[in-house]
Image (cartoon, rainbow, N blue to C red):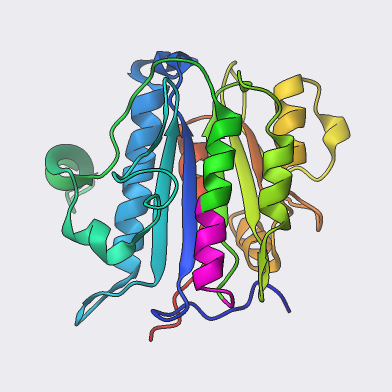
Amino acid sequence: MPYTAQISRTNPACILLLIDQSKSMSEPFVGMADQTKAVMVADAVNRLLQNLVLRSAKSDGVRDYFHVGVIGYGKSVRAGLGGTIPHEILLPISQLGDRPLRIENRTKMAPDGAGGVIEQTIRFPVWFDAEAAGKTPMCDAFAAAGLAVKGFIDEHPTAYPPIVLNLTDGLPTDGNPQQFARRLRAMKTADGNVLVFNLLLSAEPGLAVYFLADEDLLTDTCSKLLFRMSSELPPGMWGAARAEGFDVSPKARGVVFNADPTAVVRFLDIGTRVAPGGR
């Protein structure tokens, strides 16, 4: 069966995030005036990267179970973790663990053990900074992703298929990215085709819509575009979505619409739900 390759240091998984950094990302979520979309998404990306580091940590250090990359697209298309496009987009996870841009002290509320809550200070590593300027060159971002993914597959032809997750708040400004997403989804390892998932940030009040299987339920152009660009959830992620309480059909695609901050976190979690084998 496809999408069953064991993830190890010799056969790592590839996770690549495409992050919209256009000017509209400087706007707050609907009904949430205290945080911009760009800052919230950057925080979610940094939490995901930290979780991947922790999932790869063993007694002998951080093992390279994952090769991870971020492409930010706005006033330019750039490698979000440093380096250059296209050959330095993906980094072994141990390199991330060793060198965040900085460590911030942040506060969070936690149970005090007596029915109340207390404020705690936590250390928060930052690898990726928020930015919001320019247009939405999504086609260029997907083209860069294709080059990075091809390079990974050439080096790891039997790996779990690369996962590409695109987070945006609107339509591209440089053409139709469907052809670039189609080329990505046509790439494959011995374990299956590349997975492309998409998330559309909220533009109006309302509940997030997860993992649809039917395009006819959509009415706006942007949602239809992202639906057509998205892969079906493979069995493991489909099961994870069901376990999280989502009523997903067998042909459900990895796409989320009208996403609020909680939906972004859940999308990133389910969309990267692959586990190292331990070697």
Reply yes or no: does residue 151 show up in magenta. Answer: yes
Q: Quadrant of residue 258?
A: top right
Q: Residue at 42% of width from left, 34% of height from top? A: 72
Q: Quadrant of the N terminus?
A: bottom right
Query: Does 8 sit above or below residue 62?
Result: below
- Nearer-the-camera pick, 244 or 212: 212
Magenta residues span: 148-158
Q: Write the residue at 66% across / 42% down.
A: 255
- Horizontal side of residue 116 vs 8, given as left or right: left
Name the chief secondary structure element in magenta: helix
Q: Residue at x 56, y 23 (%)?
A: 202
Please state which of residues 56 and 89 is positioned toward the viewer in this rendering.
Answer: 89
Q: Residue furthest right?
A: 216
Report which quarter residue 200 is drawn in. top right
Could you tell me which residue is drawn at 36 percent across and 52 percent down? 88
Query: Can the viewer see residue 271 in this picture?
Result: no
